[in-house]
Amino acid sequence: MADRLPGTLRTYRLLSVLATPFAPLLLARRLSRGKEHRTRMAERRGETSTARPPGPLVWVHGASVGELASAVPLIERIRARGFNLLVTTGTVTSAGVAEQRLSRGIIHQFVPLDSPRFVRRFIHHWQPDLALFVESDLWPNLMMEAASDGVPLILVNGRLSESSYRRWRHFPRTIANLLERFDLCLARTPSDGNRYDELGAPRVVTTGNLKLDVPAPPADAAALAALQKAVQNRPVIAAASTHQGEEAMVIEAHKRLRERFPDLLTIIAPRHPERGPGIGEIAAAAGVNAALRSLREKPEHTTDIYVADTMGELGLVYRLAPIVFIGGSLVRHGGQNPIEAAKLGAAILHGPQVSNFEEIYATLDAANGAEQVNNTDELARKFEAWLADPTTRAEVAKIAHTTVEGLGGALERTMRALDPYLLQLRLGQRARHA
């Protein structure tokens, strides 16, 4: 397809080739900011000391923690059928989640930087027989090199927000050229499917949101018991997956709530744990006491804000706090996933910026299983109302749980769509051994 590439993709490939010599500088800068794994830098250049296992290999790629978490049940189902699995992600936090949640024998690698040289090295080493791209992390060189090697590409849990759709419409030939490389596009919602179809994706099928079929996040029993002992009977609220700018709002809401609930403990779990010390500084500047979980601190009776700046512990947060504000929604980010909180019985608050999970939030709000707040004042008032009325709070949480459970089924539909490809791999393996 190289001779049919639109000018934008030819330019992209040229620039990525020219930028390749500067990759060490980029990686060194990212390492200094905690965005790379010091001992695994070679993987970003497509190099690895891990051998490719014999037999059919299914490659699953997702950008970060959210995409990986949504794909874990799918990965495990494919693994249970006897296939080898290679999982790639692009962030340090997702590597930690992979170590925690993926079964023994499933290989995790960092996805290579999108340089033709690095990507070719990666593809030629692993020789995947099938590639599943999760949601929307579509790197042009990665897709083009895989397709040119004859690897069938399938988009699973495909997500395309209205704002992204509008941006992509400015480059119709570019996006159509990339999307036509997919054999199959499995979309989360009819709206996502329509957008992909209009942009040129072939064979679009709506299978539902895999995040709805992800089990509730686990929690270490000993860690949970220790925190429950430290918290005792204090009222607890939480803000989960927060982004810059939201923590100050939550801390201000906490200060207002202390007048009525002097023993209140507020847990803040930032979307990016490395921001924990900065959140502690915000709390100190606001005149409240903060403790950081990353420093192995526990909430004392004088602790106002407990910063859960660790990885993979939202299961603890949701089990401790009966009311949770889901972040990324009071700033222009698009909102974070409310499903795990709903499955663990939390009453959910969120801001208006929820385009990443628009349909889920709309369904929850319409059923009175969640409520939107638009600013610090509304956040404080709703926290106060639910703290003072546990009966209403419990009813909201029950509705959220029931609603989310009722929306499941995407995993089964996705597996049915993948069955012909997996069967083909199995038949090909038998033919080679005949």
Image (spheres, rainbow, N blue to C red):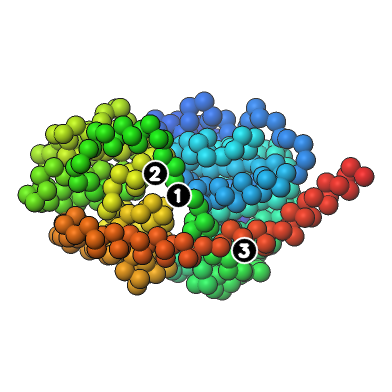
Tell me whether circle 1 and circle 2 mark residues in contact (CB < 8 Å): yes
> Dot 1 corresponds to which residue?
216
User: Residue 366: where, in percent of width, then height?
Assistant: 34, 72
Name the amino acid type tagged 1. Answer: Ala
Q: CA–CA distance between discs 1 and 2? A: 7 Å
Instruction: Using the numbered discs, state the Cα–Cα distance from disc 2 to disc 3 in whole angstroms.
Output: 27 Å
Mark nearer the N terminus (2 vs 3): 2
Q: Give the mark nearer the N terminus: 1 vs 2.
A: 1
Q: Residues within 10 Å of mark 1 (few under 14, many from 20)?
A: some
Q: Quadrant of residue 391?
A: bottom left
Above or below for 261 versus 331 = above
Reading the image, the residue beneath label 3 is 413
Q: Is residue 324 left or right of residue 68?
A: left
Indicate the secondary structure of the residue bearing disc 2: helix
Please state which of residues 424 and 30 is positioned toward the viewer in this rendering: 424
* Residue found at x 61% / y 46%: 76
Q: Mark 2 = which residue?
A: 315
Residue 191 position, x and y percent, is 50, 72
Q: Residue at x 67, y 62 (%)?
A: 417
Picture quadrant where residue 104 is located: top right
